[in-house]
Amino acid sequence: MKDENTRRAGDLPLSVFDPAPAGVAVFSGSEHRLIYMNDAYQEILGEHPLGTPAREVFHDITQEGYFTVLDQVRVTGKAVSLKEIPFEYRDHPLAGRKRHTSAGVSRISLENGEDGVMIMAVTVTDQVESKRLGGSVAAERDRFLQRYQRLIELEKQEIWVTDPSGDAIEPCPGWNRYTGQPWEEYRGKGWLNAVHPDDRGPTTAKWLVTVERLDDWNHVCRLKTRDGGYRHVRLRGVPIVDGGEVVEWIGTFTDVEQEWQEERRKELLDRAAAATADLGSLDEVVRTLADVIVPALADVCGIFLLPEFEGESIRPPFVAERLISVARTGMRPPVVGPQTVDEECDFVTAIRTRRPILRVFPKGKPPPGSVPPGAENYFVCAQGNSVAHVPVIVDGAVAAVVAVGRYGDRERLDPDDVDLLGRMLAHAHVHLSNAMRFQRTQRVALALQNYLLPEPPRVPGLEITARYRASVTSAEIGGDWYDSFVRPDDTTVLTIGDVAGHDLAAAVTMSQLRNMLRGLAMDRQEPPGDILRRMDVATEWLNGDDTATCILARLEGPDSGVWSLHYSVAGHPPPLLVTHEGEARFLEDAVNPLLGAGCDMPRSSSVAVLPARSTLLLYTDGLVEVPGEHLDVGLERLRRGAASLAREPLDDFCDKLLQLPMAYKDDIAMIAVRLPEV
């Protein structure tokens, strides 16, 4: 019995039982008023108006206890199974004939939280009379009752049925409406063809585990819709068991795209904020952020750092630095480094308008000017299908652009994806902005530092190379310095030192000490220790409480083919001598207190003979010092590393030393000299 206002059991419309071969009737309230009866039940008891109390519906039944059962089930919630109930028809076409029925009575939750009672019944008159009820018929009946009782528990709308192995065995109209697959295509395991290729394997694997454990099936995957797109659905199912064996599975599927998008949005926003929270350098921040974006949101991501444009003038050509480039496994991303932007394109438009730009296009056919600088060939080869440029604003100016893309058969980026990317950048904005400000300030400091540090002199027969590497944790100028110059007597002076601190005061003190030491050592013939004693007196008078470490060395030779090094060390890590044969040792004589520790104290000097083709290295403590590690560990690491590089060209020697596995929390200065053959 049906009308346009058929009631529901939770989310399930009772009309789902219309085609059932068993009788189904549903009653509500303490009077058990009829709210639903399908055709099969009408065949048993005849048609009755909706709203009729159960006593009127079942007035032909002579057993009074039948109504007591309805009350008990509704109150206690405990289901009852009634076998072969005898009754006689009165007001029925079959009046006077004794009948038998078997029924299951269970409590269900109706809409608005109301409790009701559902009766599922089958006529067993013929079986009782002939006593020839076959096992297969009974099994079919019990399976049917179990199927629909479990269906009520699911409380969903789209129903599917499979055999124990997962092969679809009954048509599902809802599946056809949603996916466009006709029954001939999705029967058996054909339904898997509608599952997204990337989800097919995980879906099959989880199904096998569910079947093995006899768990309830609950899985989210993407299904191809009738219009060709993909949406997330939740597949739920339960096993139907007969005699301890699973005979089939029955379940539902429900579109959960909006729910999934909301959960993904929250997860990615939280990941973007958390992943960058404790990072300092810009390289770390952009790397971590790109790893969150790929592959969750995009297949490829590039983050470009922009130059500081003058005023509002943003016109090509200009150079943008691709700081990071990350792609899904299996594809090599575009290379990092400077990229020349020499024409109007979406990249420029995003900077100028300060708004995201989204482009979608056929696979492998990006329109001119649509992809990031230097990525044109990549999007063609990778079969790119969409790209978005999102500007990052720091201190009122566009400081960077995040460019993302998708390729192959993956769904194209859409406005929701671009909005999500913008929100991810907003969640990470504080950390990203701080890192960008840090890098810009550090660049200015480094430029100033390099300006203050001179180029090594050109000395016939000698190679002299210097390096300076700024701290990754400080944006201010530091107190490390090096110097080298040739005296009037053609001897070469080498100095290196470190003033405590990372600020302008340290830089000023560093510059004063370097210039002062150059003046004192330019023409004096006295030992280096005596010159450092004079330097100590000057430091005391000029800089008060400031302290500094230093090495002053004078290279003399070659007398009779021998080079000698006259040196004195003031609280600084010792010079390192590396022979051409790969033996490395520290020059540990002439050790003295640091500058500023005591005025006018005597300071010792020492002389070391330097073999032909050997390398002398002076360096600051940033090259060997790691927080929490004993200094001797860092010194030994440097000694072994330098020994292994003994025959490398001098530039490579210095560059590779800077690549040793260090924390690099402090500035590093170094100056190296390679002696000629005899």
Image (cartoon, rainbow, N blue to C red):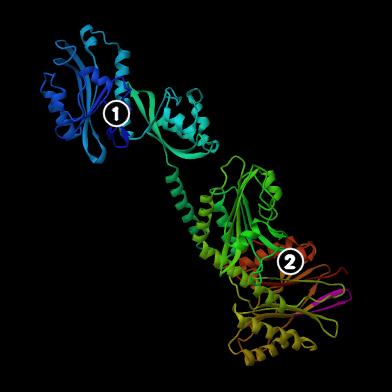
Q: Residues within 10 Å of mark 2 (few under 14, many from 20)?
A: many
Visible in this render: residue 583? no
Image quadrant containing the N terminus: top left
Looking at the image, residue 267 sits to the left or right of residue 47; the answer is right
Q: Which of 12 and 507 is in front in this view?
A: 12
- Residue 451 spot, x, y in % from top left: 72, 77
Disc 1 secondary structure class: helix
Q: Which residue corresponds to mark 1?
A: 149
Up the image or down, 409 lies above or below 63; here it is below
Looking at the image, residue 419 sits to the left or right of residue 672; the answer is left
Asked if residue 560 lies in the magenta stretch, the reply is yes
Looking at marks 2 and 1 on the same chain, the residue that comes earlier in the sequence is marked by 1
Q: In which quarter of the image is residue 575?
A: bottom right
- Residue 183 spot, x, y in % from top left: 47, 24
**Secondary structure, magenta segment, majority class:** strand
- Residue 139 spot, x, y in % from top left: 31, 17
Q: Which of 445 and 194 is in front in this view?
A: 194
Visible in this render: residue 644? yes
| Identity of the residue furthest to the top in this view | 130
Looking at the image, residue 418 sits to the left or right of residue 575; the answer is left
The boundaries of the magenta stretch are: 553-564
Residue shown at the point (61%, 73%) measured from the top left: 441
- Amino acid carrying label 1: it is Gln
Residue 654 is marked as 2
- Amino acid carrying label 2: it is Cys
Up the image or down, 651 lies above or below 60; here it is below
